[in-house]
């Protein structure tokens, strides 16, 4: 297999148009790969065995090496992109400027102004002929001759103001949409994935991944392409975003080797050969369906009528699309379905299915004002016309007692038209044509000012809405905190350090165990890189908890990379990767004298129970009894946990050279009898500017709530540090399951009355799902407890915040990169 990488160069110069059209000289076509990735588990295994022998047969046909990867030859990469496509899903076609203009014209205020202006403009050019006043009566409405000649100015001025409002609104929406697309493009470019090319492990942008690449997958990864597993180590995948199944799927060569884009690696690690990218991947197929416009849907329908096969295929894709919507990947639909479906309100269901977007608070107020002004203006104009008509009739036929003459009928009609023109003039004067223009220009100015603070506002009315907010539901991780796990306390050599100890305070023996243990027993993909900008913070790559431990070594003036250079990943004898069951990670090293040493790290309550010894004050191991463990739990671990710290225990064990080699598969016998090196407390520090910002919000009458997926103790501790909670206050802190139990009736349906009893006092919602966040936001918005409707803002930086961000009156989506110019 080693020479396969070179084969890719050999065929790159071949110019055979017929073969290229089919499969570009590869032993497998795009259609065959798509059909293969449609299959799951045993079906996929049978297909692979029947058509290709095994996964290495697929690698052979794709002309790639399972060990060396692709050569990285530009001609080879270009050929693969031509045949199998790029790892890029085209975004939905943006709205044109004219479409945005048409949307801006739908405002109720502008519609009233448009109608009034057109009627006024049309009637201004109408000049009723003069009549025989002595014979048919006199009409005196106080209109000067010059006023009649300049009557068109009123209508033209209104139309001009409407044009200004529409152009400003449409241009802002168009420019912001363009900026957001640029921002999205930059985010996509910054996302990188680990692949093997030319035998070297490198990180490349996700968009540069091609079919045939050998990609390394590890715990925490979001898979950017479809692939088939080549080698796995306790690999478990969360496929709920595609299948709706919440259980993690174990992946192995002999049971289920299919890895799908858009799924998360929950445990273990491995390597896969990429078999589908971009629109041909499973995520790409679904996104293409979700993003299809009306024209594309019509084409699909025509295809279905003409071709039965394509109909079946499209049906299968639609089923997958439905599955995705059901599990919450289509972020809006799941929460709406669970709530609206639960309360049985048909009106809400219909409203949820409408394509129209909900009005913002500002739009609602302006629409209400426009309708009120319109009704009042219409009423006054009608009263004016009625009074003028009655005055003319009474004056002419009752007081002056003139008879109704047939020859005067056309003149009477002209008089009535004149009265109608006066009524329209009253209506036009009543409608404030300057209001939409003033609001639009002031909002546009606000947007421009916010740009200077790196706040990119997508819709103009969001500026007013955020200033009108009465409640903020904020995510914790990355929003209130820095999303940079840091070691802040340590228990080492029988001493509890409330701050990071100086390197001199730790005995050399203990320091050696610490440095080696942390360096080799953290995934080698976890590392700390230099800041991107001068004066910035170091970049954490990989698992955040492991990065915190590596950062602690750097604070102790030790370099983990020196140890890793001395003991490369290939030299590790055995690795027990972290998973949700063992809640620890262990690495075995084989020493030159034939002895073994195992380093272990994990949740303190798990690892500490397996420790029979502990390093004393001078760095030497001493007996560690259950009573000693209970003392450490009470005096160290519980105080750390009460402050919201995550506690990690570091330990090791030696296997002497003279003894028989242990049975490494019997993990329970291996990871026991440990010696405790240290217990560290790790936290995600609160952003320094957050407490002051929350105080300002509270002084302004805005209630700040924390809604997070983290555990309730950590959430409560962070809320206290931020000022969301203050000691002695009577406020609620709930977990998601308790929240759901309180707001649902016996049938499991959500009741607004139950939500109304909870949300006014709720300050922290922990262990919450995306649906819980959406339910809370919807419940506060729909509440009628207070006299005025609550205006809810949501802040967040993760996909799980998506439903709540969309439901809120205004959503603040946090992005960790500088905005494009």
Image (tube, rainbow, N blue to C red):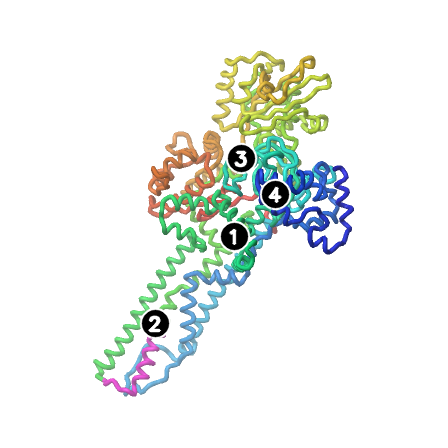
Q: Is residue 274 above or below residue 623?
A: below
Q: Is residue 387 left or right of residue 609?
A: left
Q: Nearer the viewer, mark 2 or mark 3?
A: 3
- Picture quadrant where residue 485 is located: top right
Mark 2 Cα within 10 Å, few/some/many (few <14, many 20+)?
Answer: many
Is 695 left, or right, of 564 in this rendering?
A: left
Q: Quadrant of residue 608?
A: top right
What is the distance, in whole Å, between disc 4 and disc 1 at their CAs? Answer: 27 Å
Give me the C-alpha separation between circle 1 and circle 3. 37 Å
- Local secondary structure at mark 4: loop
Q: Which residues are magenta?
A: 402-422
Residue 668: give x, y in percent of width and height: 57, 20
Look at mark 2 in the image and give the residue it sits on: 423
**Badge nearest the viewer, 3 or 4:** 3
Secondary structure beneath dot 2 equals: helix
For label 1, the residue is: 458
Examine the residues drawn in magenta and state their main secondary structure.
helix
- Give the mark toward the camera: 1 or 2: 1
Label 1 secondary element: loop
Q: Residue at x 48, y 38 (%)?
A: 692
Identified at 55% across, 49% down, the residue is 286
Residue 394 position, x and y percent, is 23, 78
Tell me the tag on residue 248: 3
Reading the chain from its start, which is encountered first: label 1 or label 2?
2
> Mark 4 highlights which residue?
224
């Amino acid at each position: 297999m080693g020479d396969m990488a070179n084969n890719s160069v050999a065929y790159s110069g071949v110019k055979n148009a017929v073969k290229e059209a089919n499969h570009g000289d590869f032993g497998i076509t795009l259609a065959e790969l798509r059909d293969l990735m449609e299959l799951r588990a045993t079906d996929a295994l049978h297909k692979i065995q029947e058509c290709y022998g095994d996964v290495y047969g697929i690698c052979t046909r794709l002309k790639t090496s399972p060990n060396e990867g692709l050569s990285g030859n530009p001609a080879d990469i270009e050929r693969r992109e031509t045949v199998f496509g790029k790892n890029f899903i085209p975004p939905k076609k943006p709205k044109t400027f004219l479409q945005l203009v048409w949307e801006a014209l739908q405002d109720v205020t502008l519609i009233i102004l448009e109608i009034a202006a057109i009627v006024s403009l049309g009637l201004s050019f109408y000049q009723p002929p003069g009549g025989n006043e002595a014979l048919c009566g006199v009409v005196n409405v106080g209109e000067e001759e010059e006023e009649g000649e300049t009557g068109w100015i009123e209508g033209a001025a209104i139309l001009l103001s409407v044009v200004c409002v529409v152009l400003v609104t449409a241009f802002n929406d168009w420019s912001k949409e363009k900026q957001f697309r640029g921002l999205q493009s930059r985010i996509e470019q910054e996302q990188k994935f680990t692949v093997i090319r030319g035998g070297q492990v490198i990180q490349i942008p996700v968009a540069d991944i091609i079919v045939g690449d050998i990609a390394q997958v590890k715990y925490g990864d979001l898979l950017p392409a479809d692939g088939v597993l080549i080698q796995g180590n306790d690999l478990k995948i969360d496929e709920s975003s595609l299948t709706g199944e919440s259980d993690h799927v174990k992946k192995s060569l002999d049971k289920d080797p299919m890895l799908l884009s858009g799924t998360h690696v929950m445990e273990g690690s491995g390597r896969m050969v990429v078999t589908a990218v971009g629109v041909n991947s499973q995520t790409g197929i679904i996104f293409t369906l979700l993003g299809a416009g009306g024209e594309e849907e019509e084409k699909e329908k025509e295809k279905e009528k003409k071709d039965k096969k394509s109909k079946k295929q499209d049906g299968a894709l639609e089923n997958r699309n439905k599955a995705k919507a059901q599990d919450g990947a289509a972020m809006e639909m799941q929460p709406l379905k669970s709530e609206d479906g639960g309360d049985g309100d048909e009106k809400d269901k219909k409203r949820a299915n409408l394509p129209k977007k909900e009005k913002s608070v500002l739009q609602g107020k302006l629409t209400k004002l426009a309708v009120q002004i319109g009704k009042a203006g219409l009423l006054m104009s009608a009263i004016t016309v009625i009074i003028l008509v009655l005055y003319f009739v009474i004056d002419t036929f009752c007081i002056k007692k003139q008879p109704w003459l047939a020859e005067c009928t056309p003149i009477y009609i002209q008089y009535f038209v004149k009265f109608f023109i006066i009524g329209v003039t009253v209506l036009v004067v009543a409608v404030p044509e300057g209001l939409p223009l003033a609001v639009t220009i002031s909002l546009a100015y606000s947007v421009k000012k916010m740009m200077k603070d790196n706040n990119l506002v997508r819709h103009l009315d969001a500026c007013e809405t955020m200033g009108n907010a009465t409640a903020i539901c904020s995510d914790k991780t990355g929003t209130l905190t820095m999303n940079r796990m840091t070691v802040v306390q340590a228990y080492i050599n029988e001493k509890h350090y409330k701050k990071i100890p100086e390197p001199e305070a730790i005995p050399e023996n203990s320091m050696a165990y610490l440095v080696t243990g942390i360096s080799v027993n953290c995934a080698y993909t976890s590392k700390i890189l230099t800041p991107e900008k001068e004066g910035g913070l170091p970049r954490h790559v990989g698992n955040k908890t492991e990065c915190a431990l590596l950062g602690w070594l750097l604070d102790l003036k030790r370099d983990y990379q020196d140890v890793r250079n001395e003991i490369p990943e290939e030299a590790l004898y055995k690795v027990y990767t972290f998973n949700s069951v063992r809640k620890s990670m262990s690495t075995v090293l084989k020493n030159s004298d034939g002895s073994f040493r195992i380093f272990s790290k994990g949740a303190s309550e798990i690892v500490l129970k397996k420790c029979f010894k502990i390093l004393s004050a001078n760095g030497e191991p001493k007996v560690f009894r259950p009573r000693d463990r209970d003392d450490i739990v009470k005096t160290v671990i519980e105080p750390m946990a009460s402050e919201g710290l995550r506690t990690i225990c570091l330990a090791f064990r030696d296997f002497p050279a003279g003894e028989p080699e242990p049975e490494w598969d019997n993990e329970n016998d291996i990871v026991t009898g440990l010696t405790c090196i240290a217990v560290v407390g790790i936290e995600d520090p609160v952003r320094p500017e957050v407490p002051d910002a929350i105080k300002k919000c509270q002084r302004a009458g805005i209630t700040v709530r924390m809604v997070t997926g983290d555990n309730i103790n950590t959430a409560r501790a962070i809320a206290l540090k931020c000022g969301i909670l203050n000691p002695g206050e009577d406020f609620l802190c709930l977990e998601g399951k308790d929240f759901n139990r309180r707001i649902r009736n016996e049938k499991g349906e959500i009741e607004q009355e139950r939500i109304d009893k909870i949300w006014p006092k709720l300050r922290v919602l922990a262990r919450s799902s995306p649906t819980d966040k959406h339910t809370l936001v919807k419940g506060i918005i729909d509440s009628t407890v207070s006299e005025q409707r609550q205006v809810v803002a949501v802040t967040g930086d993760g996909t799980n915040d998506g439903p709540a961000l969309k439901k809120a009156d205004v959503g603040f989506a946090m992005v960790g990169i500088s905005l494009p110019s």
